[in-house]
Amino acid sequence: MKEALRPVLELSVVLPGLLLAYFPVKSYLKQPPGGLAAWLLPLMLALSVVSGLVCYHFRASTAAALAFLSLTAIVLYTKTLRISLWKSGTIALSVCAVFACVNSLSRAVSAAILMHTQAAQPGPWFCLEACIFYNALCWLAVLAALYPSTHAVRAMVEDDNFAQTWYVFWVLPLVFILLNLFMIPRYSSTLQTGRVLQGYMVLSIALLVLLFWFNAIFLLMANSLNRNARLQQENQLLSMQQRRFDDLKTAIEEARQARHDMRHQLHQISALTESGDLEGVKAYLAKAVARIPSIDMHFCENRAADSVVGYYCALSKREDIPFCAQLDLPESLPVDEIDMCLVLSNLLENTLEASLRTAPGRRQIKITAYLHAERLLLIETENAFDGEVREKDGVFRSSKRRGNGVGIQSVRHIAEKTGGASTFTYQGGIFSAKVMLRG
């Protein structure tokens, strides 16, 4: 019984690994945590037991079975989440890297125990004490990573400013996994040599410490980059508000001047009327009306949305692009205002750029935004476009440079982060974007 338990214990570490991987992505599950655990944990436990018994029956190493279980767990993990493969895959590789270092350390502990008891290696697996140590250390790693993974790492996963970072970070855990695989001696008896065992144990501990150190450094750098990106976004919004305020102040000053001149204009109209010059009165009134600026720049009660839409409205009018906005937003919103402003600015920037490449007679921009059921913010934009929209597998290609478009991807990430949704359609020369943000 003890002999059959050893390979099963070696393979059962996939359970704490899965638990650790799910800590940072709890808000992105496709089903409730209880429902997911009800089928996933029994499935992986059953696979671990069956694979361990198969290894025991054939006296085979657990390496192939562990690779199969790890790959199965990674596939199931990525399929049960609503985030990109880059993020979920990188998290899974990071967990595998930690457990690979623990595996190497447990191998050294097993060899040390066998040397101390002067026993031969009873099969191609760790001794029972080392298997218990292996599982205990894995569960301790899960407990130690509970707070940072549910706070700092989760914040990094939920932030959309690090889209490019996830494309690179996966290399680090992969390197540590390969290093641990490279360290495994060809023959298990090789470790039962004093100096070899000491060096192997030191390397195993050093790799584990280095992995935690590199992850901590990366987390600190990511948080710093996050703060800088947030500040840049806030500065951009403040710049929009400042330009909007300057435009509004100019319009108010012109209107004040027009009212100041009204008394003199009324005297002139009175003189033309007394002389019976109706054509002169009409011409004079037309000139006076033309000098009064339009200050219809207020769209809704929410200042942040009003500033962003007003900024792009001014840019559109400057380019003679018809701009129609219908915003019914209260002063206080159930969603994060920065997320809302990023969605609005990305959508309106895309509509403006598309309109500039469209024939003047067909240019138009429409935007509507309102609350639904007090918790949902619905935003819709429409714009005419000329040319071809390049899309592949739901990803839009950028029209300004080579590669994928960033604006639409950012809108999608923000909508998914809040538990909402987004759809983008184009037909008959009209591009339409519909976004739902959940409070």
Image (spheres, rainbow, N blue to C red):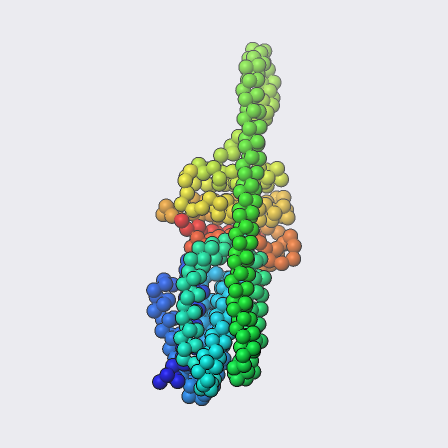
In terms of depth relative to the viewer, which is nearer, 368 or 220? 220
Q: The N terminus appears in which quarter of the rendering?
A: bottom left
Extreme-right residue of the structure: 401
Looking at the image, residue 170 lies above or below residue 284: below
Work out whether 64 lies above or below 157. Answer: below
Residue at (49% x, 64% y) in the render:
91
Q: Residue at x 42, y 86 (%)?
A: 56
Please, is residue 210 above or below residue 379 in the view? below
In this rendered view, identify the residue nearer to me: 270 or 11: 11
* Extreme residue in the bottom direction: 58
Q: Is residue 423 visible?
A: no
Number of numbered discs overlaid on the protein picture: 0
Q: Is residue 128 visible?
A: yes
Q: Is residue 102 left or right of residue 362?
A: left
Looking at the image, which is closer to me, 354 or 93? 93
Find residue 51 and report its horizontal and vertical position in percent: 42, 81
Report x, y in % for residue 399: 63, 54
Which of the 4 image quarters holds residue 393?
Answer: bottom right
Residue 354 at x, y percent in the picture: 60, 49
The residue that appears at 59% across and 50% down in the rendered structure is: 385
Most foreground residue, 254 or 414: 414
* Residue drawn where x is 57% and y is 35% of the image: 243
Q: Residue 213: x, y in percent?
A: 53, 61
- The answer to whether residue 405 is left or right of residue 122 is right
